[in-house]
Amino acid sequence: MKPYAFGIDIGGTTVKCGFFNNDGTFVEKWEIPTRKENKGERILPDIADSIREKLAKHGVSMDDVEGIGVGVPGPVLDDGVVNGCVNLGWGVFNVKETLSGLLGGIRVSAGNDANVAALGEQWLGGGKGFSNVVMVTLGTGVGGGIIVGGRILAGAHGAGGEIGHILMNENETECCGCGKKGCLEQYASATGIVRMAKITLSDNEKPSKLRSLAEVTSKDIFDLAKAGDETAVELVEKLGKMLGTALAHITCVVDPDVIVVGGGVSKAGQILIDTIQKYYVPAAFHACRATQFKLAELGNDAGMYGAVRMVLY
C-alpha cells in the first residue's frame, strides 16, 4: 500500500480536507469554501487544485498516494454516480470518474457523507474494534450510516442508512424536509425537539423555565432536563422514545455490535444514551437487546476519516 491518502468531506459551506498517512494519522487538515455557483461546477476542480497544492507543499508525489475518498451530501451509487445533490447544485454525474480525471487517473472512492462518517467512527472512533455498526447523527436533521462487515451498506439506490426518514407518526400534519410527514427527523433532531417544545409550551400553561428563554435550543432543553424541569424532561423522554423505538426496528434487520450516537445533540452526553436505551431495550428483538450504545468520538473529522478509510481497505 502506498504511504498516503486523502479524505474529503464535502459540505454545503466548506469542504473539509485531510491529508493522511496510511495508518490513519493526519499529515494536515484544512478547509476550502464550497463554491456552489453555476451548479457547483467549481467544487471538484477546487478540490483537485487544493490536493496538488498540499502535495507540492509536503514534497510528495502523486505516485505515493493510494487514493482519494470523498463524502458527498446526497445519495451515491457504488459506481460513484451521485443521484443529485440539491444543496450543492449537482445533478446526476459520476464523482469518482470526474475527480479522478482531474488528477491524472488516481483512484477515487465516493460515498454518502453520513455513511462515510459512520465508517470513520467504525474505524477509529466510537465503533472502533467492531465490524458491524449503526451510527445515528443528531443535528439539524437525523442522519445515519450502517456498516456491515466493516463496509458501508449503501443499498441499491445509495439511500441506505437514511434513518431520519423512518415513519414514526402517521398522524403528523407537518411536512418533513423530505416531503413526507411523521419522519423520525421531525422529533429526534435538534430542530425536532425544539419544534416539539414550541408545540408543548403552546398547548399547556405548565410552569417551565423554557418559557423564560427568548429562543429555546436543544441544549437548553437537555440542560433543564438534567436540572429536573418537568417539561424539559418530558421532551427528552419523547425524543428518547422515538429514537429508541426506531433503533430497535433497525437492529432487528442489521443486528449491529454497537450503535454510535453523534451530532450536536450527542453533546448532551449520558442522559441522551440512558433515555434512548430506556425505550430501546423493551422495543428490541430479544437477541438484540444487549446491543451496546456509545457516543461518537471523532466530531467533525469523522467524514474525513471515513473517506480515507474507503481507499485504504
Image (spheres, grey):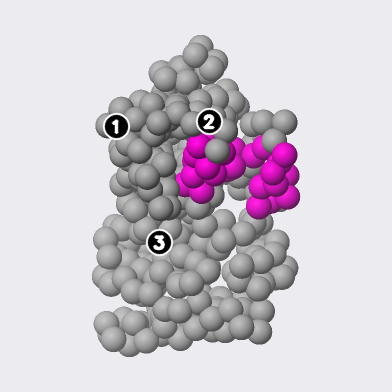
Q: CA distance from mark 2 to mark 3?
A: 45 Å
Image mark for residue 304: 3
Q: Which residue is denoted by mark 1 in the rendering?
A: 226
Q: Which residue is denoted by mark 2 in the rendering?
A: 204
The answer to which of marks 3 and 1 sits earlier in the sequence is 1
Q: Out of 105 and 93, give the one closest to the viewer.
A: 93
Image mark for residue 104: none
Measured as percent of width and height from the top left, residue 148 is found at: 51, 38
Q: Compared to 55, does 10 lie above or below?
A: above
Q: Residue at x 57, y 23 (%)?
A: 252
Identity, as a three-letter code, of the amino acid under mark 2: Asn
Instruction: Choose mark 2 or mark 3, whichever is in front.
Output: 2
Q: CA distance from mark 3 to mark 1?
A: 33 Å
Residue 89: within the magenta? no
Q: Compared to 102, does 174 lie above or below?
A: above
SS at circle 3: helix
Measured as percent of width and height from the top left, residue 171 is found at: 72, 31
Drawn side of residue 273 relative to residue 280, left or right: left
The residue range painted magenta reads 173-201
Identity, as a three-letter code, of the amino acid under mark 3: Met
Q: Residue at x 62, y 59 (%)?
A: 74
Q: CA distance from mark 2 to mark 1?
A: 22 Å
